[in-house]
Image (cartoon, rainbow, N blue to C red):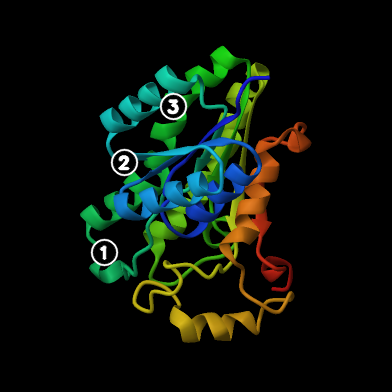
Amino acid sequence: MREQLALVTGAGIGLGRATALALANAGYRVIVTDVLEVEGREVVAEIVNSGRLAEFHALDVTDSGAVNRVVSAVEAQHGPVTALVLNAGIARTLPLASLEDAAWDETMNVNLKGMMRVMRAAIPGMQTAGGGAIVCLSSIVGAVLGWSEHIPYVASKGGVMGLVRAAALEFAGQGIRVNGIAPGVIRSAQTLDPVNSLGEDGLAAFAETVPLGRVGNPEDIADVAVFLLSDKARYLTGQVIPVDGGTTISL
């Protein structure tokens, strides 16, 4: 049986880190990528110390050449990437009145175009392997809800939904499944930032509105990603699944 090879972007912290660890526990060899080299290597060390297989590659998803080089190097050593988690992203508080083109472009370049770049690089290997599975991280803001003063972020995460659906149709005939996850409010470095997101007090307040009674943890998302990449989700493609404790059904 061929070794299952997974690549995760933005895997140094938060949802990406939890997903890398969950995939390793599920038996995948995990390629941890991030611009955060120290954090990424720490994730690899944690996986390796648990007796699993992982390696780190520094990767800026806004650099097409770097993306192509990393994917090519990984495939040259290990074979095709057949499980791909596209998670790298940024969120900034950017009121429209002061929003500059460069800030809009930066968010789109990381959150949406960055996903396309990595997907584009990995798809040929999946085609050669006869199939694969991709999970893209969207958000309930963009997929269902808005978020004041975060227009670029919300627009980029809405774009991820379109990316998932179009790619799922384009590659379904080749055994490649493409799905997305729209996380609700998850406790992570991003949401704990009181300037660009909710901060600790905001998370506590939001938890009171969630039907399941709490904000999410990164592991809540990671476990769904592992499922979507597995054969248990073999008849599932083109879907973006809210994982939000019931937030979007309670509105």
The residue indicated by pointer 2 is 58
Question: Helix or strand or loop: what does disc 2 sit on?
Answer: strand
The residue indicated by pointer 1 is 99
Tell which of 163 and 13 is nearer to you. Answer: 13
Q: Amino acid at mark 3?
A: Arg
Q: Is 114 situated left or right of 200 in this image?
A: left
Q: Gap between marks 1 and 2, in whole Å?
A: 30 Å
**Sequence-wise first label, 1 or 2:** 2
Answer above or below: position of 126 versus 110. Answer: above
Question: Helix or strand or loop: what does disc 1 sit on?
Answer: loop
Of circles 1 and 3, which is in front?
3
Q: Is 119 situated left or right of 244 in this image?
A: left
**Sequence-wise first label, 1 or 3:** 1
The residue indicated by pointer 3 is 120
**Residue 219: which quarter of the image?**
bottom right
Q: Gap between marks 3 and 2, in whole Å?
A: 18 Å
Specify the label residue 163 is tagged with.
none
**Image point (42%, 20%), residue name:** 77
